Amino acid sequence: NPKKQWSLNDFEIGKPLGKGKFGRVYLAREVKSGFIVALKVIFKEQIEKYRLHHQLRREMEIQTSLRHPNVLRLYGWFHDEERIYLILEYAHGGELYRELRKTSRLSEKQAAIYIASLTQALVYCHEKHVIHRDIKPENLLLDHEGRLKIADFGWSVQSRSKRHTMCGTLDYLAPEMVENKAHDYAVDNWTLGILCYEFLYGVPPFEAERQTDTFRRIMKVDLSFPSTLDVSAEAKDLISQLLVKDSSKRLSLQKIMEHPWIIKNVTSHDTII
Ligand SMILES: COc1ccc(/C=N/Nc2[nH]nc(C)c2C(=O)Nc2cccc(NC(C)=O)c2)cc1
């Protein structure tokens, strides 16, 4: 029930799951119901130090309001003198990032299932006027059935405010974001192209030694498909229709779902079509 005032006494804290940017995440069990959650503990002085109040509040408002099988739930939150606690959905599989490091490249079918799931989650987010803007493997979690969950809305915005600050690694940023220009929903479409390439080739398309070179490669859309890897023409076609500099010319989310590569690799029971 959303209106309940939660406190630490409502939970038994389990093992630490890992460290986020501004605190740790713990496995936890809600005592009365036995329900397992992930409790993200954020130190207030970290938030004050980096003046991220507005961003954290936005993350919480956004994630609380989103209900979609591929978006990690934020069930509620509470705080004490020095910490803020986010009661988040527990995704047993952890970060997709870890899976990518283990298997280095995904099968075309698995990659297409993840891209279709992300696309459907983004259709839902964009309907709610939410642009995520920071979709990268670290922000994608897998649940016990291997279903993908978009987490960490810390960098997302309600589309009304054009205000934004630079995010982490440049690899996933669209040209208009890297140029710090006003941007719109289509930044997430670009990122789908980046992720699709990384799922199939094991590295993001514009990776370079130095950030300045990544920046240059993004601005030039310096895209190439190593012939050493046997990737289908349909997959390359989808990537090429997403990694387009002019954001108005990127394949729409709807068209992604109708793309031959998705249709060929994703049957209805893989995601909610
Ligand atoms: C280190 O091996 C791990 C294996 C699985 C997990 C599962 N995490 N599941 C989560 N469900 N809801 C949230 C929020 C999380 C979460 O934040 N996980 C998390 C946090 C920080 C680092 C990691 N690292 C990895 C490798 O998953 C996961 C966490 C760690």
Image: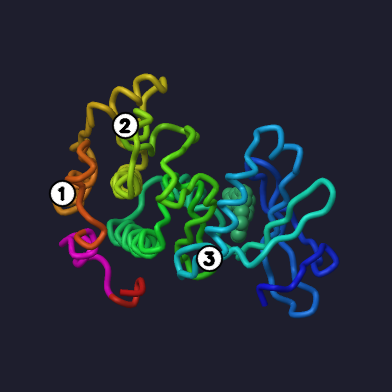
Left or right of residue 51: residue 190: left
| Residue appearing at x 34%, y 40% in the figure | 183
In front here: 153 or 2? 2
User: Any atom of ligand 1 within 8 Å of the CB at mark 1?
Assistant: no
Q: Assess whether residue 189 is covered by the magenta stretch.
A: no
Q: Tell which circle, 1 or 2, labels the residue nearer the N-terminal end.
A: 2
Question: Could you tell me if the residues under marks 3 and 2 are in contact, i.e. CB atoms within 8 Å?
Answer: no
Residue 189 position within the rendered picture, expressed as x and y whole percent measured from the top left:
30, 49
Span of residues in magenta: 256-267
Which circle marks residue 257 in the picture?
none
Q: Residue furthest front?
A: 160
- What's the distance in space between the residues labelled 3 and 1, CA to CA? 35 Å
Displayed quadrant of residue 7: bottom right
Colour theme: rainbow
Secondary element at image label 1? helix
Residue 235 position within the rendered picture, expressed as x and y whole percent measured from the top left:
20, 52
Residue beneath disc 2: 206
Left or right of residue 172: residue 14: right
| Residue appearing at x 74%, y 64% in the figure | 28
Residue beneath disc 3: 65
In front here: 55 or 111? 55
Q: Assess whether residue 266 is covered by the magenta stretch.
A: yes
| Residue appearing at x 78%, y 49% in the figure | 83
Q: Tell me the amino acid under the disc marked 2.
A: Phe
Q: Tell which circle, 3 or 1, labels the residue nearer the N-terminal end.
A: 3
- Image quadrant, ligand 1: bottom right
